[in-house]
Image (spheres, rainbow, N blue to C red):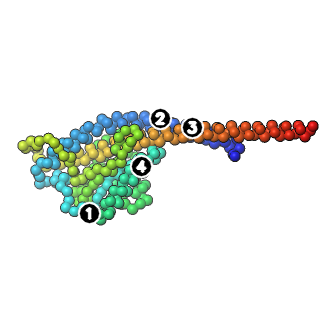
Amino acid sequence: MASTREIRRRIRSVTNISQVTRAMEAVAASKMRRAQQQVLATRPYAEKALEVLSDIARLHSSGGTMDALITPRAEVKRVGVVLITADRGLAGGFNANVLRQNAAFIKQQRDQGREIEVIAVGKKGRDWLLRYDPVIRAEYTDMADTPSAADIGPISRTIIDDFRSERFDEVHLIFTDFVNTLIQQPTTQQLLPVVPAESTSAMPPDYIFEPSAEAVLEQVLIGFIEVQILQGMFESIASEHSARMVAMRNATEAANELVDELTLTYNKARQEGITRELMDIIGGSIGLE
């Protein structure tokens, strides 16, 4: 059994760790509440944007560059992936789960003979890609907790330009969908070509566009893609802070349990030491008699 001095040192060490994890839990909880309000506020807009796109994609072809974002390629040979992860760890299984989803998607695409390039958003995804095989097309790190359209603009412009230049035949977004504080679900969503949801509303007989159908629809489609990436960022940020808060809470509880166990061990060791000292005193007194 370890000495009482060593046990006291371990108790102090674990207590200090529990104080750190408790502080990190409080910070993550504060950020999680803001991120949760943000994602719930923007989710209806993203869903409505998808509904609007459902009607746009059912319009007759305008014959312009807008059609390239809607029309599927005859053969898919090259696939681009926008992978959203965190810049930091200590978030439980948050990063591991989305990276596992990414690895499974890459394997599925390669089994079909397709080439893969990844746009990494977040340091954890970039570091994972550097250790393994997938090619990194671009990387974006140190994103703000409240990203704006200006932050997402370079990402959307990269994938749109690559898709139009036929560098990519498909582009997918892999992120973590925020369900609630305890559940975060890794999700794969196709960005390009745009695949609209089934619309139940009846189509109007015709639309009148100014200045032209191509100009209007192209901007709407680009805006829609930016909205989907931005919403994926919001979902991932809320999921990250929720996962970190839960992980730090579990770490604090585990540290407290370990302190209780060490305290019990310390009391037993101390009691054994006192007992031995008493036995030595009694043995000495008997010897003197």
Which amino acid is tagged 3? Answer: Asn
Q: Residue 95 carries which label?
A: 4
Residue named by callout 1: 77
Q: Alpha-carbon distance for marks 4 and 3?
A: 26 Å
Of the two numbered discs 1 and 2 on the same chain, state the one appearing first in sequence.
Answer: 2
Residue named by callout 3: 256
Q: In which quarter of the image is residue 265?
A: top right
Which amino acid is tagged 1? Answer: Lys
Q: Which quadrant would the C terminus be assigned to in this image?
A: top right
Residue named by callout 2: 26
Q: Alpha-carbon distance for marks 1 and 3?
A: 54 Å
Query: Element under label 2?
Result: helix
Q: Is residue 60 above or below residue 36?
A: below
Pick whichever, 234 or 200, lies toward us. Answer: 200
Q: Alpha-carbon distance for marks 2 and 4?
A: 21 Å
Q: Is residue 92 above or below residue 104?
A: above
Pick whichever, 46 or 66, lies toward us. Answer: 46
Q: Which mark is residue 211?
A: none
Which amino acid is tagged 4? Answer: Asn
Q: Quadrant of residue 4?
A: top right
Query: Element under label 3?
Result: helix
